[in-house]
Each structure stands twice: as C-alpha cells, then as structure tokens.
Amino acid sequence: MTIRVVLADDHPMFRFGLRAVLEQTEGIEVVGEAADGAALLALVDELDPDVVLTDLSMSDVDGVTVIQTLARTHQVLPVLAMTMHADEVHVRAALRAGACGYLLKGADALAIAGAVEAAASGQVVLDPAISQQVIAAYAGSDERDPVAFPELTARETEVLRLIAVGCRNHEIARRLGIAEKTVRNLTSSVLVKLRVPDRTAAALRAQEVGLGSPMP
C-alpha cells in the first residue's frame, strides 16, 4: 500500500528536497505540500493523507497549532514534526500537541523515509539527537510537571517556559522563530490568563509547577 504524505514548510527549496527524498522511496507518495499552517490544514481536509510531515516555525498558523488542530479534527492521522529546533521547549510542545514523532532537519534520507513508514504503521518516532533528552525529561518529571496551565495555548506555554528561565522578548522571538511583537502579545495573554501582574509573577508561577528547568 502506498503511503500518501502531505508536507509543510515555509522554505520552497526545503520542500523540494524533502519531496525528492520521500519519492525516492518505493511505497511513499507526496500528494501535496504547503507553505504555511493554514494551507496545510486545508490540504489535509482535501486530500486525506496517511501521514503529515510539518515544520514548526511557519507564518500564519504555526506548526504546533496545526498539530493541535489535527489532533482534534483528524484523531487517527499521524503527524510528524520536522524542524531545526532541538531544544526542550519545542520538543515538549510538539509532542504534547499530539505529534507522533519529532525529526531534526539534519536527518538523512533513510531516516526520514523510515520515520514516515513508522508513523504510518502507528509507531512513535524520535530523532536520535533528541531521544535521550526526552527520556531524561520524563524520567525527571513529577506530579507538578504535566499540563500545568490548561488555559494556555501551546504557544503561550512555550513563551511562559522561556520567561521562567529568564529569557527576554528578543531571545524568545529568536528561539521560537516569531516576531517580538508576537511575543509581547502572547506575554500579555499569559498574564491575563494566569491573573498575574507582571512577568516576574508569571515566572514564579511557572517555576512552582516545574516549568523553569534550565534549557540549552
């Protein structure tokens, strides 16, 4: 059976290379590609693929939000995150949103094709470069660490976690691949939802539930 894949990334040349890699593998067909999250959601509705492979840092609707949306609307559809980000914030956000796997863009052709085949068969796929990080994170988790603030979106939680480790707006923007204005808007939303007066109070709330652990 042919595995029908939809892929999304905002860099045309990366999409071109990724399509070429996948279509070299017998039994995999790329049926659609998108440059942003909104287009990806529309393609999934239209094409009903077997696997989705998406970047996390895209304009319009980001990859984490896309994964969350697909987890609600297409519950059995495997979604693989493929990104340049290897830090804990992005890994946790993608997996908690519902991704069945996490690949880094440095992965070779065999690993990428194997990940798509594994995802299609219902397996969880982790890039070797981040698997130990994920194991360590779960081994060190405790009662405080699950979804501590369900009122926050995945992106707001990412921002809160970075605030908790002392990152300023420009650093948060750089890490998450978004504009500083977006960071300011997300921070304001976090403060409102947590009912705290400022960033310091938000950081303290986050640290109380274990969101303030050091990151690379």
Image (cartoon, rainbow, N blue to C red):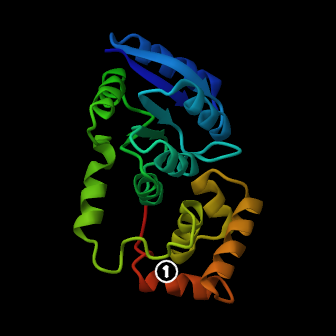
Image location of residue 99, percent across then percent down: 41, 46
Image location of residue 206, percent across then percent down: 49, 80
Observer-nearest residue: 193 or 203?
193
Image location of residue 128, percent across then percent down: 28, 42
Count numbered badges in the picture: 1
Residue matched to label 1: 206
Local crowd at mark 1 within 10 Å, few (<14), some, or many (≥20)? many
Instruction: Relative to 143, say whether 99 is above or below.
Output: above
Observer-nearest residue: 35 or 14?
35
> Could you tell whether 183 is left or right of 3 in the image?
right
> Could you tell whether 195 is left or right of 184 in the image?
left
Q: Residue at x 25, y 71 (%)?
A: 140
> Residue 160 lies in what quarter of the image?
bottom right
> Could you tell whether 170 is left or right of 154 in the image?
right
**Quadrant in which the C terminus is drawn:** bottom left
Residue type, label 1? Ala
**Quadrant in which the N terminus is drawn:** top left
> Residue 144 lies in what quarter of the image?
bottom left
Q: Residue at x 60, y 83 (%)?
A: 194
Instruction: Relative to 34, say whether 81 is above or below.
Output: below
Q: Residue at x 39, y 10 (%)?
A: 24
Residue farthest right in this picture: 181
Q: Residue at x 77, y 61 (%)?
A: 181
| Element assignment for label 1 | helix
> Could you tell whether 137 is left or right of 73 in the image?
left
Instruction: Relative to 194, say whether 75 is above or below.
Output: above
> Residue 8 lies in what quarter of the image?
top right
